[in-house]
Image: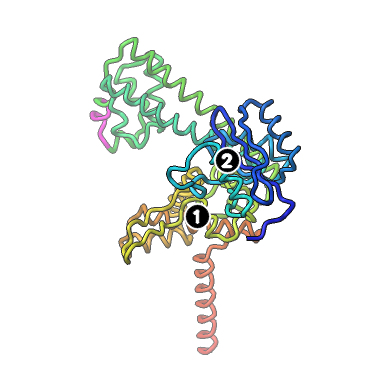
Amino acid sequence: MHMDSNRTVAGLDVHKDSVYLCIMGHDGAIIFQKTYGVLTPELRRMREDMLCRGVTECAMESTAVYWVPVWNELCGSMALKLVNPYFIKQLPGRKSDVKDAQWIAECVLKNLIKGSFVPGPAVQDMRKLNRRIMDLNEDMTYNCNKLDAALQRCGFRLSNYVASTRSKSYQSVLKAIIGGQTSPDELIKLVHGRTLNKHGRETVKAAVTASFSKTDLTVLRQLKEAISLIERQIEECQKELTALCKEHFPKQYERIQTIPGVKERAATAIIAETGVDMKMFATAACLVGWCGLKPRNDVSNGRFKSRKVTHGNRYLRQILIEIAWAASRTRNCFFSNFSYVQTTVKKKSKMKIQVAIARKILVALWHMLSKEEDFIDLYLRRQEELKKAEEQLEQLESHMAN
């Protein structure tokens, strides 16, 4: 294998409290090895040592979040590669931190590894906000479940008869209880009429009849305050994320929303996770694999051992599945028609079809961002062509009749 005579490369084995550096020359000889701490002054000292020895390329494993500060210190000084540890595993019995750094440097020197996708600073800021929103949504679900459990312990059963604990009726009754109003005759007045008509006034009245102690009211008030705080933080993060998208990628932000089921939240999440530059993904299949929506290729002796989707960017995959559900419920679009045919006509699993729709949406995204085109709905186009053909046929028949 030909290697450039001017290349000097480095491999880094990154840990929580230490970084192992190995610098290797063009002939494969080890020029320098040292262990550094992870404090910022020590990382800068490591960078200076690397530059003094002519390092132009460096690779490191994507170890949790510990690689991020190392990357930030080195990214302006040399070409960097972030590598999935799965692709550069050593043979069993040859594992040590020093040998890891040597092996990474050797892989870089021999061009055996390809770097993972690391977005620019603007997109990284968007990612922080997007993932913060997802974490807050998990906290919201946890606290809402805790709140309903606290009410259930008191004998309050309204959540059995409303669509969601986030519904207007439930929230109005909860606010009244926290304020000290626990009379069933007063609480039932806050329940929506449709709920009363559907389940019966007496049933709903029995559901809001409960015994609340002073301690119960304190717990309910604190849980409600925690939920309100989370809501404010989600709103703040989303507002800042939307502002960043409009500032850096206004055209792409509007273009992505032409996809059925995609609105502000989904569009900002997609940009935050993928960026808008598709050059890092040579084909749409590369993007699908990076996201983790590609079916697993696991066949032995003609038998499929597994067809589960692969690992990938779980944040992007989660938002795409949510978009798929929304798109499958959007009337007169390709995705809802596809969902109907696959689930109702062909009797396939609804969950598997949502994964298939998410994969189709991601492929469409790659083409839209690569070619700078808006979403084209093939179903609507086909309907328009059929309508036009029918009109032409009617005109022809009318002309022949005359």
**Magenta region, residue range:** 199-205
Q: Nearer the viewer, mark 1 or mark 2?
A: 2
State yes or no: residue 201 in magenta.
Answer: yes
Is residue 317 in view? Answer: yes
**Element class at badge 2:** helix
Residue on which the image places disc 1: 289
Kindly indicate the quadrant of the structure image that contains residue 176. Answer: top left
- Determine whether 192 is above or below 324 in the image: above
Out of 392 and 103, give the one closest to the viewer. 103
Out of 80 and 26, give the one closest to the viewer. 26
Kind of residue indicated by mark 2: Ala
Q: Residue at x 53, y 63 (%)?
A: 377
Residue on which the image places disc 2: 101
Kindly indicate the quadrant of the structure image that contains residue 111. Answer: bottom right
State yes or no: residue 42 in magenta.
Answer: no
Out of 320 and 210, give the one closest to the viewer. 320
Q: Residue at x 54, y 41 (%)?
A: 100
Q: Residue at x 59, y 30 (%)?
A: 236
Whole-percent x, y for residue 400 in the image = 52, 89
Q: Dot 2, how many residues are within 10 Å of its Cα: few (below 14), some (14-19), or many (20+)? A: many
Distance from the alpha carbon under mark 1 to that under mark 2: 28 Å
